[in-house]
Image (tube, grey):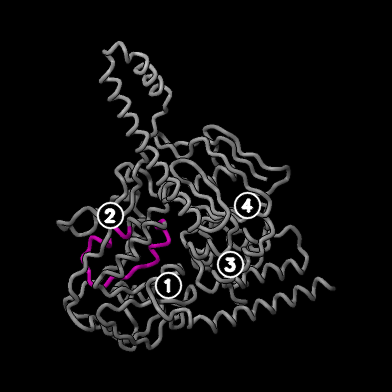
Amino acid sequence: MVKVSDVRMSFGSHVIFDEVKFNINRGERIGLIGRNGSGKTTLFNLIIGTLKPDGGTISTPKNYRIGGISQQLTFLKQTVLAEACTALHGERIEDIWWVEKVLAGLGFTERDLSKHPEELSGGFQVRLNLAKALIKEPDLLLLDEPNNFLDILSIRWLIRFLRSWGGEFILITHDRGFMDSVVTHTMIIHRGKVRKLGGGTEKLYKQILKEEEIYEKTRLNVEKRQKEVELFINRFRAKARLAGLVQSRIKILQKQEEQQKLKKLKTIDFSFNAAPSPSKYPMHVEHLSFSYGQQYPLLIKDFSVTIAREDRIGVIGKNGKGKSTLLRLLAGELVPLQGRITSHPGLSIGFAGSYADFLQKTGWENEGLQTAPAEPRSPSPFRSSRSDLRRRRAELINERSRVISAVQEKIVGIETMIHSTEEQLDKNNSMIIIASERGSGEEIQMLSKENHSLKNRLSDLYEKLEDALREKEQREAVFDRKLEELSRN
């Protein structure tokens, strides 16, 4: 059992944790939720020992192993398979089959296994680190956004894997459907405290909301009674015959603890600033083909589509199959080898992902905002607070997508291309985005791996995944049979 007792943690004047207490019991699979900036990643760092609390203790049993996903994309071995095997405790052949099964589940092909890790894309390098964390099988596994760089098929595999996890884990993810499908308990960081409850996220959110409503009603009733008592005291203080009653009321007031009004929590107030669509069909794509060089195969081949007014199009597929490339082609950031893209002259395109590379090169978040065209607009709802803007980008990793969205939102466009920005939004803010898109008159093309977002925005999407899922499950069955044969021998 992991025991967290009276932990306090602050960064300057900003209090993250105020005498936090909770236990992680044997076999518990915990989903950790909370608003962006509430301290979820900080709690991971405290548990794993890379941060020391200002006060309190975190205790674990003897020989209890805690593991997580490495943030360092540095690799020592010459192949993906050899690198993944560094997480093994032994070198038995059945263990190597186990490694291959995990890698296959996370989307690695047989050809990928012989590649040098440096040849992989950044997303697959992150997957490799995730695979190593799973292969190590620690007693407590800390998973911070493990599904960020996974496609839908790999996410489905990871769900099955985590459901069968033999130890404990704590999971951070903005995909509530993913979280609810694997956890036994949900834990929330809220107003500097930590609260744990059996069940999924919705149950805990409802419980917190109910408790705060009761608290606020009680506080208002107490405040009303206090004013009545104060009025009585002031009215009859000078009357000698009522001196005893006045003194008893004064003692009642002195004994009562003041209940502070709950601080209003920030949410974004957001709606798309959509201009009327200039055409019934604002964009036509004809026979589009693209590759990243003559030595590489075509990533997109003979692709055609017509985008109609108010279309909402989901782009799905495995990582590395060209989803982001397609959006960049439509946004005009890449030039096709063949084919053409015809847009209405009045069409303005906003592409959220196009500012990510720029922001990674700059040291300060507000520099990104200064690059957008100056328009007499209301303040962006994605804007971070002044104190946040003075913090380095590395300290605000979950706010990065908000800044990208803030820049994109400053450009008034009819067609908006959203590149998985909801992955970094908390539950309340992502629901506001969904509601806003439904009421928007824009054509929205969406690249998303978050099941809840896709279900809310698109229809008939999951029927197309059934064949791919069956094929993946068949490949897993082959690995299971080989593992069983090896264990018998």
Q: Residue furthest right?
A: 489
Badge 1: residue crowd in 10 Å (few <14, some 14–19, many ≥20): few
Identified at 50% across, 45% down, the residue is 42
Residue 146, position as x, y percentages in the image: 53, 61
Q: CA distance from mark 2 to mark 1?
A: 25 Å
Q: Which residue was labeled with disc 1?
A: 455
Q: Amino acid at mark 2?
A: Pro
Element on which disc 3 rests: helix
Residue 487, position as x, y percentages in the image: 81, 71
**Which of the 4 image quarters holds residue 326?**
bottom left
**Which of the two discs, 2 and 1, sits closer to the camera?**
1
Q: Amino acid at mark 4?
A: Gly
Q: Which residue was labeled with disc 2?
A: 381
Q: CA distance from mark 2 to mark 3?
A: 34 Å
Res 159 label: 3
**Which of the two discs, 1 and 4, sits closer to the camera?**
1
Q: CA distance from mark 3 to mark 1?
A: 18 Å
Left or right? Give the position of 12 relative to 481: left
> What span is in magenta?
404-426
Q: Which residue was labeled with disc 4?
A: 67
Identified at 74% across, 77% down, the residue is 481
Please say whether residue 312 is one of the residues in the magenta stretch. Answer: no
Q: CA distance from mark 2 to mark 4?
A: 37 Å
Mark found first going from the N terminus, 1 or 4: 4
Element on which disc 4 rests: strand
**Which of the two discs, 2 and 4, sits closer to the camera?**
2
Identified at 31% across, 45% down, the residue is 385
Q: Amino acid at mark 3?
A: Ile
